[in-house]
Amino acid sequence: MTVPSDRARFLIIDDHPLFREALHSAVQMAYPEVDTVEARSIAEAIDLLADAKPFDLALLDLSMPDVHGFDGLLQLRTRYPRLPVVIVSGYEEPRIISEALSYGAAGFIPKSARKSDLAAAIRSVMDGAIYVPETYEGQPADADSIDRADMVQRLSKLTPQQLRVLQMLRQGLLNKQIAYELQVGETTVKAHVSEILRKLNVYSRTQAVIEVSKLDNAELFRDQAGF
């Protein structure tokens, strides 16, 4: 996927201003004519992605203030499945890279990479490749990874409103509380919940919460300082 001549747009999602600046510099090295937009949280990124003018690539840090683990990547992949999302992270553990790729990341770039390597990685992804560090050795898929990847596929079938309802279910909100937050009737919320259960192939809202919570992958980030 080569950048078109009519100025493509990249979205940098990172809560650290110094690293946003470093990514911006790497993007400019790779594509001097590309417009870059910055977001400091997943919520801000989603607001920007709702803009009528689409983005061609998102560069996402896993460690964000309003999400945990892969939740930010999952939100972007389910809401905007056609948007290539590249993880740029300080966590280079092979299991984390494998999980990110299984959830549909278009690449995984270590934050420790030099600016020239960052630029080369971005060009590689834009040309259609899936970038991983040279030192990365693929992990064999285990049963849990396969199950999580299958759940990601089912989540991709949810509408943005259904995703919002599911997030509120995970927060333990009742139907009337969800209706108040979304400013809709309880009947509408019940219809959304029914569709969520059907699309996720689960029989209750409790099971839906349990199954989706497995995607948090807290165990993958245990003992990772600073996450």
Image (cartoon, rainbow, N blue to C red):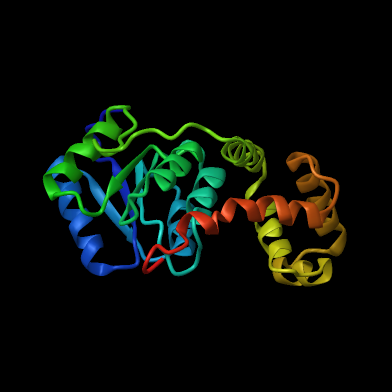
Given residues 78 and 191, the one toward you in this image is: 78
Given residues 202 and 27, the one toward you in this image is: 202
Disc tally is 0
Q: Which residue is drawn at 73% across and 56% down?
A: 209
Q: Which residue is drawn at 48% across and 43% down?
A: 99
Write down the quadrant of residue 174 in the picture: bottom right
Q: Which residue is drawn at 46% across and 60% down?
A: 42
Left or right: 71, with 60 as reference point:
right
Write down the quadrant of residue 225 in the picture: bottom left
Up the image or down, 127 lies above or below 186; here it is above
Q: Specify whether residue 87 is in view.
A: yes
Q: Quadrant of the C terminus?
A: bottom left
Q: Residue at x 56, y 35 (%)?
A: 142
Q: In which quarter of the image is the N terminus?
A: top left
Q: Specify whether residue 3 is in view.
A: no
Left or right: 102, with 171 as reference point:
left
Residue 5 on image: x %, y %: 22, 32
Given residues 88 and 85, the one toward you in this image is: 88
Left or right: 38, with 26 as reference point:
right
Residue 41 on image: x %, y %: 42, 65
Left or right: 54, with 160 as reference point:
left
Residue 72 on image: x %, y %: 49, 55
Residue 162 on image: x %, y %: 70, 51
Up the image or down, 20 lies above or below 153; here it is below
Given residues 41 and 107, the one toward you in this image is: 107
